[in-house]
Image (cartoon, grey):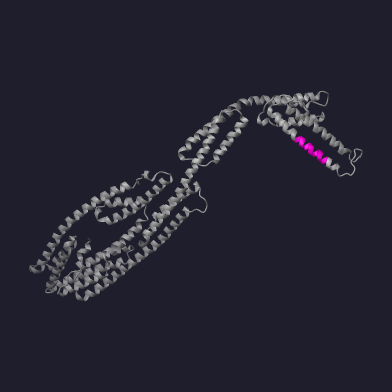
Amino acid sequence: MTTENLHSEPQENNVNETENIVNENVITESISEPETQDEEIHDEVEQHEHEKLTSGELMNKLEALINAEDAGANHRKFNAIKETILQRVNLETEDQKQQHESEGKPVADFKFEHPLLSKIYTLNNLFKEKYDNFHKKQESEQKENLEKRTHIIEKLKNLYSNSTANTNLFRAIREIKEEWSNAGQVPKSEFKNLNNNYFFHLNQFYQMLDLNKEYREQEYAHNLEKRNQIIARAKELQDEPVVQKALNELQFLHKLWKEEAEPVAEEFRDKTWEEFKEISNKIHERKSELLTQIEEEQHITLEKKNEIITALKKLATPDKAPNHNYWQQAIKKVEELRADFLKLGSVPRKISNQNWNEFKVALRAFNTTKNEFYKGLKNSQQTNLEEKLKLIKTAQDNMNSEDWDIAVPLFKKLQEDWKKIGHVPRSQTNKIWDDFRNACNTFFNNFRTKNNAQTDDWKENYKQKRALLDELKEIGSEEGSVEKIENIKTTWNSIGKVPRDKMAINSEFNKTLREKLRLNKINEYDLKEEGLSESQLTDKARKIKNQIADLEAEIVKLENNLGFFGKVSRDNPLLKDTFDKIDEKKAQLESLKHSLHNIISGE
C-alpha cells in the first residue's frame, strides 16, 4: 500500500463544490499512470543498472538495504538484487560441475558451495526478520493512523456544525488538512470508507463556507497560491534529468493538489487545472523517452550478448583439431566472455529468458566439448605414462654402466625421447620425473667423476704421442726405416685418448705417416702392427675393403679403355702406360687382399 492510495477519488455528491472537486480529481487520475506500471518501469530501470554491477557490488547493495532504517520497505529491490546474484551463483556452480566432470570424476562426488551462497542466505534471513518486523510495525502504525484520521474527521464535522462565532475557520481548515496529509497510511480494508467520509465532510464544510464570503475568499486565495506553487514545481520537473525521479515527484504533486489546493475561485479553477494537467502530460510523455532509451540500450546490449554467444560457439567448434594449449587458452577466453556477459546490462524482457538460455547452452556446449577432449587426453596420458615408465626402466638398468661409448649416447637419446612424449596424469607427473631425473643424474655424475680421472691420463697420452710424432718426422728412406715406422705405429695404437683440444695431433700423425710410407714405397696396409684392439682391427678391415673395391673399379675402367683399340698389344707404345698402371694396381690389389686375409685370420 502506498500513500497515494489514501487519496483516491471521492464519492459524488449533489453539492456543487463537491462536483467541482470530483471532476478535477477524475481528470487528475486520468493522466496519472497506474502505480503498478510506474513500479514496473522503476524495476526495469533498476534491473538494467544491476546487470552492469559485479556480484561483489550487488552484495554490498544487499547489505546497505538491510542496514537501512526502512529495510522492510525495500523488499522488491532486495529480492531483485538477490535473484540476480543467485542467477550468477548457479551459473558459476554449473561451471564448477563441468570442470569436475572434465577431470573424469564421478558426478555423484561433486561437492561445491559457492563462497557467496552462505552469505546470501544469512542476509536473506536477516532481511526476512526485518521485513516481518516492518509489517508488524506497519500494522501498528496503520491502526494508530486510523484512530488519528477518525479523530480528524470528527474535528472537521465539528468545524462546520458546532464552531463558535469567533472560530478562525481559515486557520482551522488549514490545520485539519495538514493533519490529514501527515496522518499516514491506514489498513487497506478501512481506506475507502474513511477516505469517502473525509471528503464528504470536507465538501459539507465548503458548502457552509459559501455562506461566509470573507472566509470563502480567504480559502480560495490560499488554495490558489498553493496551486501556483505546485504548477511552478511541476514546470521545474520538466527539466529534471532523471525521468523516474520526475515521475515520482509528479505523483506527489497530484496528491498535494487534491488535498491542499482545492477549491479555488471559479474563474481560476479550470485555468489552473488545465495548466497543471498539460505540464503533467508532458512529464508523462518523458516516460516514453525513458522506455525508448532503455530499449535502445537493451538492444545494443542484446547485440553484444549475442556476439559473446557466437564467440562461445566458435570456441567450442575450432577449425583445426584442438590441443591442450588451445583448450587452456580457450578456458581463459571463456572466463573473460562470461564475465563480460554478466557485466552487460539487461536485454528486452520478452527475450531475456531466451537470451540467458542460449548463453547457458553455449557455455554447456563448450564445456562438453572440452570435457570430451580431456577424457580422450586422459587415455593418451595413460599411454604416455607407460612409455615414460619404459624409459625410466632403461635408465635405471644402465645408470651404473661404465661403457661410456655406448651409455652416453643411450642416455642422451632417452632424454630426447622423454621430451617427445606428451603429458601424463597429473598425479604421476612429479614422481616419474623424479625417478627419471635421479637415474640420469646418477649416470652422468659417475661419468663426470670418471672423466675427471681420465683427464690426467689423457694429458700424459698426449706427451707420449707428441714424442712419437717427433720421432716419426726424423725417419728417412734408409735401411730399417720400415721397421721403425712399424714400431712407432704399433706404439701409437697402444696409447689411449688425448684431451679434446689436442686431438689435432692424430691428423698430423696420419699425414706424416703417409709421407714416410710414400718415401719408403710401402702401402700402409702392409705395415705390421701389433696390439690393435678389436675395434681398431675392425676399422682397419673396413678401410681395406673400401680400398679393394676402389682398386677393382679402377682396373675394370682401365681394361675397358683398352677395349677401344682394335688390336691390343703390350708392344704398342701408346698402350704401355695403361698396361703399367693396370699391373701396378693389380699388385696393390693382391697386397691389400693379403693384408685383409691376415686380419680376418688373426695372423
Relative image position of residue 287 (x, y in whole percent)? 32, 66
**Relative to 377, 184 lies left or right:** left
Quarter of the image for residue 391 reads top right
Relative image position of residue 238 (x, y in whole percent)? 31, 67
Q: Foreground residue, 286 or 556?
A: 556
Q: Main secondary structure of the magenta part?
A: helix
Residue for point 84% across, 42% down: 561
Q: Foreground residue, 323 or 76?
A: 323
Q: Residue furthest bottom?
A: 267
Q: Is residue 554 magenta?
A: yes
**Relative to 408, 163 lies left or right:** left
**Relative to 300, 585 lies left or right:** right
Q: Is residue 440 visible?
A: no
**Where is the N terminus found, in terms of image quarters?**
bottom left
Residue for point 24% across, 56% down: 73
**Relative to 459, 431 lies left or right:** left
**What is the total number of numbered labels drawn onto the structure image?**
0
Relative image position of residue 525 (x, y in whole percent)? 77, 30
Quarter of the image for residue 244 reads bottom left
Q: Is residue 232 magenta?
A: no
Region in magenta: 546-558
Residue for point 13% across, 62% down: 150
Relative image position of residue 418 (x, y in whole percent)? 54, 38
Asked if residue 242 is positioned above or below residue 19 in the image, the reply reads: above
Q: Is residue 492 visible?
A: yes
**Where is the C terminus found, in terms of image quarters?**
top right
Q: Foreground residue, 239 or 304?
A: 304
